[in-house]
Image (cartoon, helix red, strand yellow):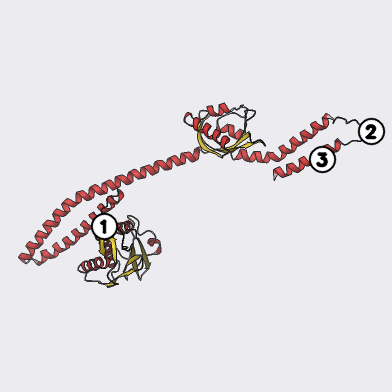
Amino acid sequence: MFDAMAQQQLISLQAAGEQNFSYESTTGEIPSAPRNLDTTTEQKKEQVLHMYHQPLDLLLESIELGLWRYDLPLNRLVWNNACKRHFGLSPDTEVTLDLFYELLHPDDRATTRQTMERSIAENSIYDIDYRAIGMDNQLRWIHATGRCFYDDHNKPEHFDCIMVDITERKRVEQMLRQQTDLLKELEMRKDEFISMASHELKTPITSIKGYTQMLQNHSKKAGDGQALYYLSIMNGQLNKLIDLVNDMLDISRMQVGKLNFRDALFDLYTVVQETVRNIQATTHTHQLSIEGVPGVQIFGDNDRIGQVLINLLTNAIKYSPHANRVIVHIAADQEYATVSVQDFGIGIDEAHRQKIFERFYQVHDTAEKGASGLGIGLYISNQIIKRHEGRMKVESVRGEGSTFSFTLPLFQRGKSLS
């Protein structure tokens, strides 16, 4: 807007100047234009340009936007005051291209020079971050963007550039990188601790498990029913502890990509049937049923898929204390098989459904204090299904139950098993 108004004023001045030069000659000689008219016109032009560019200059100063122009034929560099402040220079300092390079950080001089020369030679955008060590000995990060302009003969005429002080942004980026590195280190230490603790726990747990079974056999022979009752409870708690340790080991192995898989061709219905039968033997409160047809062939680790089913079934029983049934459904299309585990329990709020497959995420439900855990079973299950190129999802209505399902790609005949 400022340039358009200034242009209109300049046109008016030019028209006025031409009127001052109008004449009628009777001698045929062309008189010279009065010098004072030329001077007056140029001064008015400068005044108009200054009047309309002054607000723009003030704006650029207020946002500390550095502007510079390098006149290539004259080897002359012109900076505005904001640009000089970026380099710790006073407003009256005369700048040169050599001074510019001298004020750059030694490690950035060559790259900055090469980037500018390449921009001029290839008519490409000049875009670079570099460090400047100003005359005030302050180190600043500068982001510079510019390009070269050429004359009618395609020769470089002038190079224009915009500079912005990004020191604060770089400081924040460095702080974030340090925090990220620290979090990674803490994460690594945590995984190492989990792995070490899990391995150390396995030995005493295995020993306690063995002695518990020996005491159970002894109490059975002695007909000590009370001892058998308490030992049975102890054995059940030991089984939960063993499962927890195994889950912790699986997580630590996942973090380093060492979770073992033994892939082979297997019948999905058979794995579901065996898993349901084993879980049914451990519960008298829920009836587990299977819907679907056999003959669904999957290539993968059947033990790991069974591990996923065990987790979903035990969760279905745990989180439906006032229901008495769980339905497992198997379906298949041309490409994928889907296994769904449906319960009729407390359900899951939508806010939790978005995060339930995250590691260590727990749904805290005050209404069901007995349903607790570390929030790792679903995370491990989801990672196992992803390893099989499938996916898991959950559908739930609060107070009506949940359906957890996973899909697995079907085995394609003719596909190599290697």
- Residue 243 is situated, as x and y percent measured from the top left of the image, at 23, 58
Q: Position of residue 78 (x, y in %)?
A: 63, 31
Q: Is residue 263 visible?
A: yes
Q: Nearer the viewer, residue 49 or 155?
A: 155
Tell me the distance, in whole angstroms, between the alpha carbons under discs 1 and 3: 89 Å
Residue found at the far left of this picture? 222
Instruction: Please give the name of the residue rendered at 24% of the width and 60% of the height, measured from the top-left corner.
Output: 303
Residue 370 visible in image: no
Task: Please tell me which residue is depicted at 92% across the width and 32% down the height of the picture.
Answer: 28
State which tag comes first along the sequence, 1 or 2.
Answer: 2
Q: Amino acid at mark 3?
A: Ala
Mark nearer the viewer, 2 or 3? 2
Picture quadrant where residue 223 is located: bottom left
Residue type for callout 2: Thr
**Sequence-first tag of 2 and 3:** 3
Side of 216 where 408 appears, left or right:
right
**Kind of element beneath mark 3:** helix
Q: Quadrant of the C terminus?
A: bottom left
- Residue linked to disc 3: 15
Q: Please tell me how crowded label 3 is: few (under 14), some (14-19), or many (20+) other residues with Cα within 10 Å.
A: few
Out of 339 and 358, give the one closest to the viewer. Answer: 339
Q: Quadrant of residue 144?
A: top right
Left or right relative to 226: residue 324: right
The residue pinned by badge 1 equals 263
- For mark 2, what is the residue? 26
Q: CA distance from mark 1 to mark 2?
A: 110 Å
